[in-house]
Image: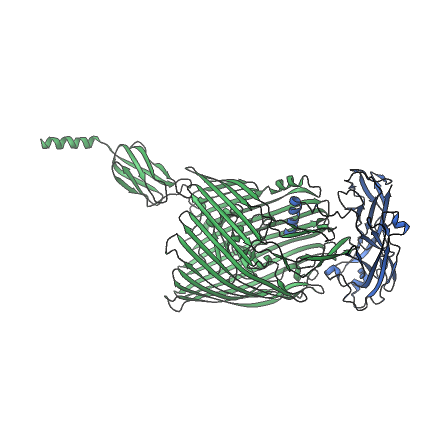
Chain colours: A green, B blue
Amino acid sequence: MSWLLLVLFSFSLWAQENVTFNGTLLEKGTRKPLKDVSVFILPHKLKAVTGENGKFNFENIPAGKCTVVINLTGYDKLERDLECGKVQNLNFYIEKKYYTSFETTVIGKVTKRDDQGQSLTQEEFIKAPGSFGGDPVRAAQNLPGVAATSGTAQIVVQGASPEDTGYLINGHRVPLVFHFGGLSSVVIPEAVERVDLLPSGYGPEYSRAIGGIIGLTTKAPKDDRVHGMAYVDLLNTGGLIEGPINNKSSFLFSGRYSYIGQVLKQVAKDNEDFELTSAPTYYDVTSIYKLKVDEKNDFKATFVLSKDSLVSFANKPINNDPKLRGDIQNTTEFFRLMPQLTTRFSEKHKMDNSLSIGKDSIFFNVSGRFLDIDSNVISQRSEFVSEWKPTYKTYIGLDNQWSQSRVGVNLPTSFEVGGVRTPFSVGDVKKFETEASSTLLGAYLRQEIKTSEDSKWTYLPNIRVDHFTLTRESFLEPRFQLRYQQDPSLLLRGAWGKYVQPPLPQESSPIYGNRDISSPYAFHYMVGYTKDFRQGTTNGLEFTNNFFYKELKDLVVPDVQSRYSNSGTGTIAGGEIQAKFRKNEWTSQVVYTYLESTRHIPGYGSRPSEFDQTHNLNLIGSYRKEKWTFGGRFRFVSGLPYTPITGANFDSDNDVYIPISGSIYSQRFDAFNQLDIRIDRSFIYEKWILTAYLDVQNIMNSKNPSSIDYSYDYSQSKKGTGLPILPTFGIKGEF
Amino acid sequence: MNKLFLIIISLLFYGCGDDFKKVEVLSEFRVLSVVANTPEVLPGAVVNLQLFVSDVKGGGRSIPGTTVSCIDPGIAFGAKVNCDHDPSAVTGTYDIDTTTPDMTSNLFTGLAADVLSVTVPAGIFIGRSTTEQFNGVSYIVIFNFTVDGKTVSVFKRIVATNRGTLNTNPLGSAVFLNGVAITSAPAKDDNLKVTTNSPETYDFINAEGDTETRTEVFQVAWFITQGKFDKPKSDVDETVKYLGDAATEPSLVVSIVRDDRGGVQIVREVFP
């Protein structure tokens, strides 16, 4: 009997056909393969684990009804009933609980070289409130030491003038990072890997900026499959596509076009004072090519093109200045092609070589008074990094720039002290055409030294040399940094260094400026610490505190006799804190900077600098709930100083009033305060993601005065308000 | 350039101080121009200056003033408008009397009767380059008045030059209303323009040291006692539109033509 039962049971097993079942596990929306994930088949209680490309395979499972179950932390649970044996090679999509915008190209954690600086990754800036749709440079205004200016996105780093800050893309200088008046930066945010802010005490790799450095780094194109993104909002439209070309190379192409001009044209339609002949517009193009040459060499080339154009007609003189009337044209255009080769000789020896070849064109014309500049610019950077020992690492580099410019000028001389400018109509008109070349040579040595492998101290005695042909000057710039890593959660740091920058072209011009002008320089001092209370988790508090002091020497200031002189000096002193707190869906940040920025000009005494903002407080918070993200930023900043105008002299020959300044920068505007909010809602489809967002700047419609308008004779005045409430609604699709 | 863009944007969004008094509307005491009989001279020459003033609501009065004359401290390069730098500065007085018949009958607007004679120093070229001597060295005359508790300060440059052919004031200016010589006050949307004789040409040593021939660029400033213009400044032959209602009481249109080199011609029309 038992024999018979055994035969029957065996027969039944034989009758239940065994099959093979396989599939691929992908993240919903991004189609990212998920590896090392357990996939269960019920009721058979069988398990498989996904491989590198998300593929999994079951063999010898009974055919018939079954249920696939996938339960991965951070993702919604998937249960799917199937007919095992009837279907094969199925794709399974599981939905992540939280998505960041442009999830398909978010890059990894940034490796920072300079502890003195701060970096924002794409993931951080793309959803930053007040960043005008994820603009990286506007988002950098959330960082400590970066001041707000109403209605613009000028970068004021720790009380320095905007022209004292260097703007870089992939380490190479560009003439501007913002389109018109700071509307948005010149590279589409989704093509940017990170933005770095180096405010004080930074390393020897950079110079020619006594204030600070803002650097954008473009991303490496994805090479797993073709990705794309397109968006449209009230001011811009743009798109990006990237993907592999073959198994060694990949590409990215992006472009953006603004139709703000059409909006302004509608606004200007009923304005009897003004006519926009041609709508102002801007566009930019960024493309990136990456090639893995061989095991040792990686090649990346980035191309950036940016153009801003405005053509208008002013019926009435602007600012009551008779010669500021009529046709007005302002065009700024530049491009850069930046090839970069990275060679890894070994695990401890690496070399980076990059070039930047480009052209800058600026044309400005007001009724026949014009400035026309065309410059060919080549810059080159090389850096050899070598870790000789675990306790000794060096970086030896070159940082050179050459430019050849053709300049056509037909403009009056200009004089401005304390923000009060001699009218355009009064200046002595100079007309000339010239060609000029300038070479900036730089070399540096950065060293990281530890006395022993387990030493908590790291010493960085660095040195840089610079030579500027225009001013025929050479500089030795010693810089020293010190790090003390008490434990993984506490880092103390200090830095000191000398920083030099060449004078602006108009300052050293023999016709408009003073050919004997020399380069201003500064000494930076900073100490600070970062304490991470998170103990290895993602929740908790991270606290940073820095103190800085800058001594500014040989500042170029206006001089009635010689037009410009090096008689200006200044100091900037302050402290900043940044407290980042995260708990599950909540992230928040408190950023506060206190500073005093003063300048001394002989004949005008010591006074606050134009960008002295004593208190600068940023409160930033965001909350994620399922497919929703809510963000907000509140800024409170001391009002900027301004110079009162006490009267005016009527210039009978030029039919214009010349203002008489009171004590320069002796008054302040009311404090700036602004609340920005941003709401994102993602819609996740299997193969793509749609995000709708609403970004409202200045939702309280604070007036934030930052300028003063005057009547023609300066006897009446009123404060000009800053940016009014400005909502931007947009949608973005990505695959 | 970004600053200019911001100014333009703010003009578009916020207007241009619409609640401010209009530059072209005459009411309070103003000096509209300083007229020199010869705007360019040789060193040592004497120049006669007269102020063209308007005091529409002044009712006729005497306004005493002071003057100070000196070598230009470099106003075009940002120097303050004063003579503190020049120990040889010359002081004087200049009185305006708007009760004279010519002023009273013309809404207290016209050339003041007082004439200030100024002697340009013979040594004004000392220490100046040949280019400066050719293009001109300015001697400034500053007039100061206190009227209704406010300080009114105005200055004029007298250009000393060895160029040879000296600048003269523009001539032949006339105001046209809708294409014909003006005879009545403008009504709403009427078009006005100024015609004048041809501008002069003159030699100038440019920044590169070359001598070039330039042509004067005329500019017209418009004034009125009622209403307003679509633009208060225009080129010669450029049409300006009157935007106010037709005048119901005596009114005045003034156009001042400047030649960009200190020369000036004034046309005053009073209606009815």
Q: Nearer the viewer, residue A648 or A137?
A: A648
A501 in relation to A22, above or below = below
Residue A326 visible in the displayed image: yes
Q: Nearer the viewer, residue B149 or A699?
A: B149
Q: Position of residue B95 (x, y in %)?
A: 86, 58
The single residue placed furthest to the left in the displayed view is: A1
The single residue placed furthest to the right in the displayed view is: B101
- Disc tally is 0
Viewed as shown, does residue B223 lie left or right of A250? right
A182 in relation to A447, above or below = above
Q: Quadrant of the N terminus of chain A?
A: top left
Viewed as shown, does residue B156 lie left or right of B10? right
Q: Position of residue A728 (x, y in %)?
A: 55, 42
Viewed as shown, does residue A132 lie left or right of B196? left
A567 in relation to A138, above or below = below
Q: Nearer the viewer, residue A342 or A667?
A: A667
Q: Residue at x 36, y 66 (%)?
A: A454
Q: Quadrant of residue B139?
A: bottom right
Q: Quadrant of residue A533?
A: bottom left
Q: Position of residue A508 (x, y in %)?
A: 66, 62
Q: Residue at x 27, y 41 (%)?
A: A47
Q: Quadrant of the C terminus of chain A?
A: top left
Viewed as shown, does residue A239 lie left or right of A63? right
Residue A244 visible in the displayed image: no
Q: Position of residue B98 (x, y in %)?
A: 86, 52
